[in-house]
Image (cartoon, grey):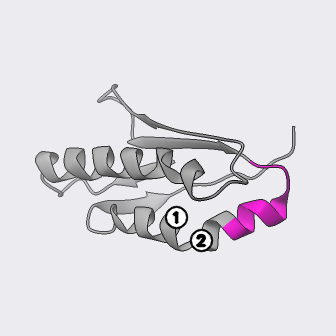
Amino acid sequence: MFKLKDEAPAADKLAAMQSFKQAIEALPATIPFIRKIEVGLNINPGEQWHIALYSEFDTLDDVKAYAQHPDHVAAGKLLADVKESRACVDYEA
């Protein structure tokens, strides 16, 4: 999940969120070991987190490779100016 800076202009946050969603959801075309990926943009202004990213991989090694993949890194940079914090959980089902 991602929390954006309160002081960032709303238009900047929305543009970054939409660009991030588009970039992340395009990644399976270039990172074939992504089994599933989706980005949800929060519609409830009463919540503190703005973006949820859900993804599925076969192995933790695939997760690590995804994290370092240049296309993923580039997508992450789309939030650089507006991101306050990030929370992540990697787990096995």
Question: Tag 2, which secondary structure?
Answer: loop
Residue 72 place in picture, x, y as percent: 52, 64
Badge 2: residue crowd in 10 Å (few <14, some 14–19, many ≥20): some
Boundaries of the magenta span: 57-65
Res 69 label = 2
Badge 1: residue crowd in 10 Å (few <14, some 14–19, many ≥20): some
Residue 67 place in picture, x, y as percent: 62, 67
Question: Tag 1, which secondary structure?
Answer: helix
Q: Could you give the CA–CA distance between mark 2 and mark 1, rounded to whole angstroms?
A: 5 Å
- Image-based side of 23 in relation to 89, left or right: left
Question: Quarter of the image containing the C terminus?
Answer: top right
Q: Is residue 18 visible?
A: yes
User: Does residue 13 lie above or below 37 as drawn?
Assistant: below
> Which residue is tagged 1?
72
Q: Is residue 49 visible?
A: no
> Is label 2 in contact with label 1 (beta carbons under 8 Å)?
yes
Residue name at image x 52 percent, y 74 percent: 70
User: Does residue 40 lie above or below 81 as drawn?
Assistant: above
Residue 50 place in picture, x, y as percent: 38, 42
